[in-house]
Amino acid sequence: MRFLKKKFYEYYLKPDIIFPSRIDRREFAFLSFSDTMMRRHISFPTRDRLLYYLRINAPAHAYYSSAYYRRPDAATMQEKEWMGADLIFDLDADHIPGAFESGYENALRMVKEEMKKLLDFLLEDFGFDKNKMHVFFSGGRGYHCHVFDRRVIELGSGERREIVDYITARGLDMDSVIVEKEIFADGYSIKKVEIMPSLPSWRGRIARGIIEFLKEIKSMEREDAIKKMMELEGIGRKIAESIYDSLDEERMKRIEEGMIDQLSAYKRLIKPLAKKLAVSLHSSTDEPVTADIKRLIRLPGSLHGKTGLKVEKVDIDAIDEFEPLRDAIAFGDEIVEIEVKKPFSIEMNEERYELKKGRARVPEYVAVFAVARGFAEG
Amino acid sequence: MDLHVIARYPFLEEAREWVKSEAVSIEEVLNEAVYDRARERAMERVKQAVEKGIIKPYPCVEESDCVMEIFSYPIARMIVAAVESDFLIRRYALAEAKKAYETLKNEDASFINFMLEKFGISMHDGKIHFTDYLKYAPTWHSKWKLVNRIMERGYIRLEKNEMARLLQEAIRKKIQDELFYLFAPPEVRKIFGELINRLRAKTVVKEDKKYEGEESMVYFPPCIKSLISAARNGINIPHVGRFTLVTFLNAVGMPIDDIVSLFRSSPDFNEEKTRYQIEHITGKISGTIYSVPKCATIRTWGLCNPDELCRKVSHPMIYYRIKRGKNEVPKEKVL
């Protein structure tokens, strides 16, 4: 622990903090390496005071409130007087079922994909300005998105929940995304479903999702296609077969134009597809933090005590290129010696480290990561 | 603005301005025979709100009909305020809002636009921003959930009657927020005493008297808190102080026996006498329920020791309601 604490002290001599707006209205909270209790209700009138605090305390974890308070250092919520809050999305590998099965690095990649979905919703559907949003790698197991558009700051918890429900497709009325039509021709009535791929919001998203999915299915070998469809919830072999076998050129063309006949089989695709298109924002145990208007979030540019990585800003336009284990490294590459307690493998800064029990010489950033994760001692 | 329009939407600033420009005093409206019809209609508004949940429109043929309809609104508000019941305030605000909705959905687009702007909602080619939408949409209904709307770059297209529905909620909120801050002048109690007492018996018991024992006390205003601690510590309280305390505790629903025991430590405690006085004030004997004195009165009696919230309110019951966390504090004080 001494090693880690020393390194954190070194970092906080000259940290790259990205300051939240209206710092004087925010509550700060810290957890040090030795404390078990979080130190809360701290406020700083200026950026320099915060930097000074970080320098002398070098906390293991640093947080600030998404909310703005009249008296951020008051001990109770009532006395603090809530004035508004940024809109925060917290995407964590914990929220994705099975994310850790293929390791830490892969889990982070999966969360990044979720973040890309979220950004598409926020930019296309909600119309937020890119300049009024920040995306951060949390330093731990996920990504955060902060929206500080003036119009969302005053939204209450119920209104934020509606935003969450939107991007997670909760409460989505499956009948509203498609329009069933009865067409009369030659004395017969035919039921048809109209989908609208050119529309914005969920109606368009589902329609485009269906078309894309069916195109993919059509291009696949029969057995593979059927298997892929059966991965979706509520699709059995019989339905999968009937969908595959019905997808001739002409039908595919009609579907791309937004007309679906033989609706009963296709209708089954909507619900599982919506689930795939939605953002995984709910953890199994708690409610999404977005609806919480009094939430603490990691201070951008601070260090994560369990990884030694930095809460790092991600360029929204270059999110694909962002590599957390390269771009969020806070320490140098000077070689240091550590005592590995538990073998581990990690790719950092584009180099793979396979470490076995015993003494090892690694770059400082690998050492910090290994010690913070509890794999080694400094 | 046309008098007929003002009569349909008497909660608008324009209506307030018009009433002001008429330069009629509250006394006149409450007492003069010319305003008989306005007072009748005011009582009808409140009664319909309670019984039907909606207020029926009043046929305005002549200009004088409009005048009566317009005046009836502030009078109705005073009656509602005098009852001092959260339940009634909510129900009345909703009934007025529903009444407005019924006519709003038939107004033309430019008027809807005008109304939206009144509530700070700006419309761009039949679309409004989702943050405005969320403030007023009844999202508990599946059709109104944001996820089921067509939203493009933050804007949602709405039909005219859907706009009217949003306005209904905006109007309801406005009327309700105003009423929580409104204190009725005492004359109202005299003139509409019978109706007020009847409504109070009906509604106050329902909602306001949610006394939850000692726990409710944290929401009491500082003046009441210090009176309670004085009573408990056997410090002699002046008559006006006891009056304030008893009317307040009765209004929040504390049982009479509990109020009596509060005075047990008083140096001159006499159970029979105390009970008689309390029952007199709380209407058990006299038939009149004395209302809680307003802040200004408490201040002149030298019982006021305000905290920050006190500066925003004019009546101890309003303090209690706000503190109980049921209502948000409106941006500006309305009175």
Image: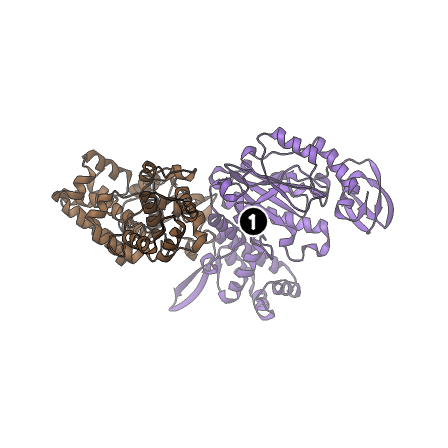
Q: Colour of chain B?
A: brown
Chain letter of the residue carrying label 1 = A
Q: Secondary structure at mark 1?
A: helix
> Residue at horizontal 22%, vertical 53%?
B195
Towards the viewer: A311 or B186: B186
Q: Where on the picture, by quarter, is residue B111?
A: top left
Badge 1 amino acid: Val
> Residue at horizontal 56%, vertical 58%?
A273
Residue B3 visible, this orientation = yes
Towards the viewer: B154 or B279: B279
Quadrant (top left/top right/bottom left/bottom right) for the C terminus of chain B: top left
Q: Colour of chain A?
A: purple
Residue B325 visible, this orientation = no
Residue at the far right in the pictured view? A359
Asked whether, in this view, residue B276 is left or right of residue A346, the answer is left
Q: Where on the picture, by quarter, is residue B17?
A: top left
Measured from the top left, where is residue A236 in percent x and y? 59, 69
User: How crowded is the residue under tag 1: few (<14 C-alpha within 10 Å), some, or many (20+)?
Assistant: many
> Residue at horizontal 64%, vertical 65%?
A227
Asked whether, in this view, residue B116 is left or right of residue A162, the answer is left
Quadrant (top left/top right/bottom left/bottom right) for the N terminus of chain B: top left
Towards the viewer: B14 or B329: B329
Measured from the top left, where is residue A88 in percent x and y? 56, 44
Q: Is residue A174 above or below residue A188?
A: above
Measured from the top left, where is residue B288 in percent x and y? 24, 52
Measured from the top left, where is residue A350 in percent x and y? 77, 42
Residue under label 1, please give it.
A289
Q: How many marks?
A: 1
Q: Is residue B250 above or below residue A155?
A: below
Residue at the far left in the pictured view? B33
Q: Where on the picture, by quarter, is residue A330?
A: top right
